[in-house]
Image (cartoon, rainbow, N blue to C red):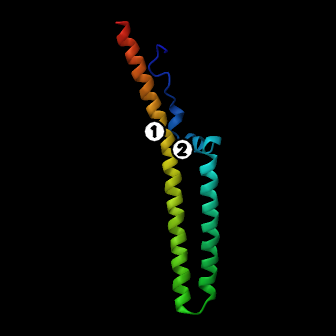
């Protein structure tokens, strides 16, 4: 271990850019692809239902297309929340690693005394 207890601390690790950079890496490629595919599917469905809403004259179909559109918007929010939680998961893992290093350093200090 190093003599500096703050050796692992990096002030740039908690910025939004660094969190997004952690999310968009090869380790998260599977989740990125899944999220973008779902996003594009629901975007296409929302656009389709929005167009059909304004083209139809029957109230029954307008309600159906409006409900589909609202559900797609809800899925957008769900996808965004899931992605944000995945970004924060990486930050939490980083904090756990910092704690492990601090505990190991503390144990080494106690053993030396």
> Residue at point 51% right, 51% down?
84
Task: Give the residue at mark 1.
Answer: 92
Q: Is residue 68 left or right of residue 96?
A: right
> Residue at point 52% right, 90% down?
60
Q: Position of residue 47 (x, y in %)?
A: 63, 74
> What residue occupies the far top of the structure in this picture?
113
Q: Position of residue 78 (x, y in %)?
A: 50, 61
Which of the labelled discs sits on residue 3, or is there none? none
Q: Residues within 10 Å of mark 1 (few under 14, many from 20)?
A: few
Q: Position of residue 25 (x, y in %)?
A: 63, 42
Q: Is residue 80 above or below residue 88?
A: below
Query: Mark 2 touching mark 1, by CB under 8 A?
Result: no
The part of the image, by quadrant, that contains residue 58 is bottom right
Q: Secondary structure at mark 2?
A: helix
Q: Secondary structure at mark 1?
A: helix
In this rendering, the label closer to the viewer, 2 or 1: 1
Q: Is residue 105 left or right of residue 48?
A: left
> Residue at point 44% right, 33% down?
96
The part of the image, by quadrant, that contains residue 72 is bottom right
Marks 2 and 1, Cα distance to the nearest angstrom? 14 Å
> Residue at point 64% right, 53% down?
33
Which of the labelled discs sits on residue 16, or is there none? 2
Q: Quadrant of the C terminus?
A: top left
> What residue occupies the far bottom of the structure in this picture?
58
Q: Tag 1 or tag 2, which sits nearer the N-term?
A: 2
Q: How many marks?
A: 2
Q: Position of residue 61 (x, y in %)?
A: 56, 87
């Amino acid at each position: 271990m190093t003599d500096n207890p703050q050796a692992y601390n990096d002030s740039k690790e908690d910025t939004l850019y660094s969190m997004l950079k952690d999310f968009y890496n090869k380790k998260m490629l599977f989740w990125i692809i899944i999220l973008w595919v779902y996003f594009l599917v629901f975007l296409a469905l929302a656009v389709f239902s929005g167009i059909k809403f304004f083209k139809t004259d029957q109230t029954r179909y307008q309600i159906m297309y409006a409900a589909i559109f609202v559900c797609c918007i809800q899925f957008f929010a769900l996808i965004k929340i899931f992605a944000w939680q995945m970004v924060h998961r990486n930050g939490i893992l980083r904090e756990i690693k910092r704690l492990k290093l601090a505990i190991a350093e503390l144990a080494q200090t106690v053993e030396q005394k």
